[in-house]
Amino acid sequence: MSVEGKVPADGMLGPRVEGPSPAMAVAFDIVRRSVWAIPIAVIASAAFWGLDGVFSTLYGLAIVIVNFLLAGWLLQVGGRIGAAAMGAAAMFGFLLRLGLIMVAVLAVRDQPWVELVPLGLTIIITHLGLLFWELRHISSSLAFPGLKPQATPNPYLPVADDASGPSTSTSAQSPTAP
């Protein structure tokens, strides 16, 4: 029997991603970690380039944060449509985001508050630094895509009541004990 005209359950673009998006979870985690980089970058740029360096660094940090959030959002939306759309969002989204970074820099390059060296260094170093930092927190398992799950105690293993010594369960006692 033919089922012409019917679209498979997964759709023409492949299987869809249901549930929370691992890409957005990673993007939000990167943004959360960027909070630690902001004071370091601002102090370093203030020491070398003064107030204009601080403004340029803050602008560069904003570009980086928006870039990561946009990457996660594009992958989330593409995944909701289908696997092929998510692949297209990854490939063409990268080109789109590079273009947006270029436009953001070219739009302000002639402003009096812009120092191009700290702006460029901030964009490059912050992107690479946050990506390498995030590598420690990404799961490499398909069972847990995105961030590594938090360690939880195994409920099936015995737990010692007294943390100072070994467990005193009946199986640990010798058979000759009274």
Image (cartoon, rainbow, N blue to C red):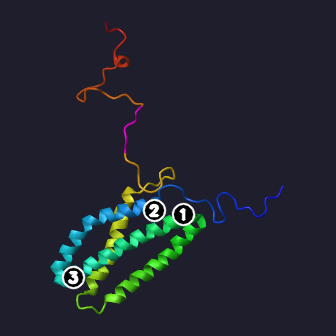
Residue type marked 1: Gly
**Residue 124 location in percent, x, y?**
34, 76
Instruction: Give, as a single range, the part of the protein colored magenta.
Output: 151-155
Instruction: Name the outermost residue toward the right.
Output: 1
Residue 21 is a magenta residue: no
Q: Determine whether the residue tagged by mark 3 lies in a helix, strand or loop.
A: helix
Q: Earlier in the sequence, mark 1 or mark 2?
A: 2
At horizontal 37% and vertical 62% (from top left) the residue drawn is 28
CB of mark 1 within 8 Å of CB of mark 2? Answer: yes
Q: Residue 79: which numbered mark, if any? A: 1
Left or right: residue 90 compared with residue 59: right
Left or right: residue 114 compared with residue 73: left
Q: Determine whether the residue tagged by mark 1 lies in a helix, strand or loop.
A: helix
**Residue 34 location in percent, x, y?**
30, 66
Q: Distance between the residues labelled 3 and 1?
A: 39 Å
Q: Which of marks 3 and 2 is nearer the N terminus?
A: 2
Q: Residue 23: which numbered mark, if any? A: 2
Which is in the foreground here, disc 3 or disc 2?
2
At horizontal 20% and vertical 84% (from top left) the residue drawn is 52
What is the number of callouts on the image?
Answer: 3
**Residue 178 location in percent, x, y?**
31, 6
Quarter of the N terminus within the rendering: bottom right
Above or below residue 17? Residue 129 is: below
